Amino acid sequence: MATIDLAPFARFTDDIAFAAEAEPATTAGDFIDQLGTAARNLGYFAGINGAEELENAAQYLTGAMDCEGAEHEVLVRRALRCLKETTDMVDEYRLMV
């Protein structure tokens, strides 16, 4: 099992934690769990467009934990791309709650 460096995801941890109604994640496993919860809260409960990208990011990171090398790096980069609209989605969510 490979490890995931959370440093590239640091700019998202507070927003994801807010949307997941949790403390900011300190491990990759916690971050993946929070992505799923945030996707549900933003998409299903709040109806915010693009929330499914958080679930996609969680899936890519889960896959990245099971591989190494180039495949690992590609999955991490894909996860980061899925999170590019996170701040806008969470800002919209903040206005609702």
Image: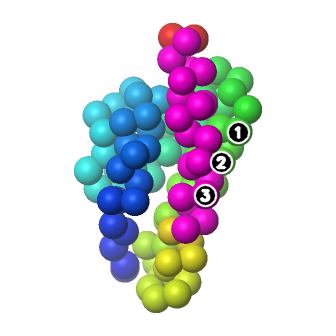
Q: Point out the frontmost of discs 3 and 2.
A: 3
Q: Residue at x 66, y 31 (%)?
A: 43
Picture quadrant of residue 65: bottom left
Estimate how packed mark 2 is, as few (under 14), some (14 to 19) or many (20 or more) residues with alpha carbons within 10 Å. many
Which is more N-terminal, label 2 or label 3?
2
Q: Residue at x 51, y 68 (%)?
A: 76
Q: Residue at x 33, y 66 (%)?
A: 5
Please state which amino acid type lies under the numbered disc 2.
Answer: Glu
Query: Image height check: is 96 above or below 35?
Result: above
Q: Which element carries disc 2, helix, strand or loop?
A: helix
What residue did someone put label 1 on?
50
Query: Image height check: is 70 above or below 18?
Result: below
Which residue is situated farthest in the bottom direction here?
69
Instruction: Judge whether residue 75 can be spotted in this image.
Output: yes
Picture quadrant of residue 91: top right
What residue did someone put label 2 on?
53
Q: Which element carries disc 1, helix, strand or loop?
A: loop
Please state which amino acid type lies under the numbered disc 3.
Answer: Arg
Cβ–Cβ under 8 Å for marks 2 and 1: yes
